[in-house]
Image (cartoon, rainbow, N blue to C red):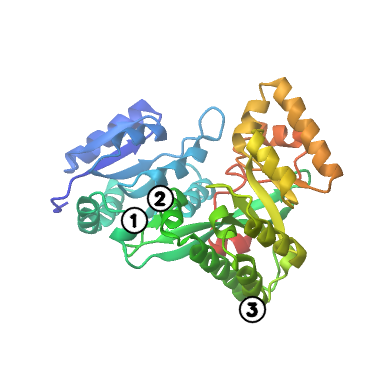
Amino acid sequence: MTSAFPYHVFIVNDDRFQRITLVNSLRKKGFSKCFGVEDIDDLSRYASRDALIAVLDVDLGGDGNAYERYPALAKLGNLLGAIVYSAYPEDITRSVYNLLCSAGIKQVFNLNKSKPLSELISQIQEITQTSQIFEERFLNAGSESLFEQCNDLRITPRYQPQFYAHSGVLCGFEVLGRMTDEFGDIHTPSEFISQLVESGKITSFTHKLIHKAISEITGKTEIPVSLSFNIDYQSLEEDTFSEEIVSLLQRLNYPFNLVTLEVTETGFSRSETTYQNLIRFRLSGINISIDDFDLKQATINEFLAFPFREVKFDKSLLYKSGSDEKLFQLLLSFCESCKRLGISIVVEGIESLDDEFQAKRLGADKVQGYYYHAPLNIEQALAII
């Protein structure tokens, strides 16, 4: 605890007595900035210049799913690390540990409460050894963009499993792009996608992500698997985009029919180039999906105009349809029409058993979400194939 850089240790435990006892014990051991909070969401109030270390009890809560919120920790830019500190059995705490690792938190430890307090202190101190690196990065970042801060960004694919809705059998993965900076920290798309689009680098990023993900899959297993990738409309405005992607898949020797390109909207255009690229993809056997589908007129027009073979519902529609019968009937009718047209329905954002039930009511063909798995690294993904 010799670092001059300020950091706070937060004990997250819904049991008030346990929370206060542990806070007092750590304060007596020299952790003066140790505090207790009841819920994981309370940490969002402390997104400040001070670094955070979270000591987490495995709070299953009344609904048995409070742990699903733990990946939200990854969104705290000042989080140094997390320690799963619980009396629950090893199989449960290990699963929570894996969930935190999958979310992109670099330093995660797992410790049973039966262990001496000295072991918890040792793990906290191990996390704080990176505080000097954090200080230099965090205090000097200023208003610079992620790309201005880091010159050597490395693409790190994560794999979100998709399952057939009614059988529960794995049917593929959505590949999610992550970027690892020079400090080893993993950044989510919300931190860099808009910059890639604005800088004109989004197509290059897409090429590299597809290459990296397929190379990882084929390099570690001979089992072909369906993979979905997000592409941007800006890329569809490039004359050679489809030719380059088709050529890339040919070089990688990956089956075209196992690849789905999910089109995301950041500036929709109906230019001749966009049509040509989408048609070329479909003629080659690559599937095209419309991502974040809603019932706005612009989205309906896209659905009618382009050769989509899959519709991916925005999760907000799923939630709203649970309490709005008129919306539910409208979506149900749309899904039934899609099935008659040979168009698959994918529902993402499944976070509970109720969400899964609602997706099945709508007639979803595929589902995905944290209820099943957080985004996985390649080893974790291969383990469930």
Left or right of residue 199: residue 210: right
Pinpoint residue 88: horizontal percent, then vertical percent: 48, 42
Mark 1: which amino acid? Leu
For this orientation, the residue located farthest to the right is: 340
Disc 3 is placed on an element classified as helix
Mark 2: which amino acid? Glu
Any mark on residue 146, and which? 1
Pinpoint residue 132: horizontal percent, then vertical percent: 20, 57
Q: Are marks 2 and 1 in contact (CB under 8 Å)?
A: yes
Q: Residues within 10 Å of mark 1 (few under 14, many from 20)?
A: some
Q: Give the mark, 1 or 3, whose residue is nearer the N terminus.
A: 1
Q: Give the mark, 2 or 1, whose residue is nearer the N terminus.
A: 1
Any mark on residue 251, and which? 3
Disc 2 is placed on an element classified as helix
112 or 173: nearer the viewer: 173
| Image position of 195 with respect to 246: above or below | above
The residue at the point 45 percent across, 60 percent down is 200
Q: Are marks 1 and 3 in contact (CB under 8 Å)?
A: no
Distance between the alpha carbons at the discs numbered 1 and 3: 32 Å
Pinpoint residue 115: horizontal percent, then vertical percent: 36, 48
Q: Which residue matches tag 2?
A: 191
| Image position of 141 with respect to 245: above or below | above
The residue at the point 20 percent across, 51 percent down is 139
Pinpoint residue 100: horizontal percent, then vertical percent: 45, 49
Distance between the alpha carbons at the discs numbered 3 and 2: 31 Å
Q: Residues within 10 Å of mark 2 (few under 14, many from 20)?
A: some
Q: Residues within 10 Å of mark 3 (few under 14, many from 20)?
A: few
In the picture, residue 225 is in which quadrant? bottom right
The residue at the point 45 percent across, 53 percent down is 193
361 or 265: nearer the viewer: 265
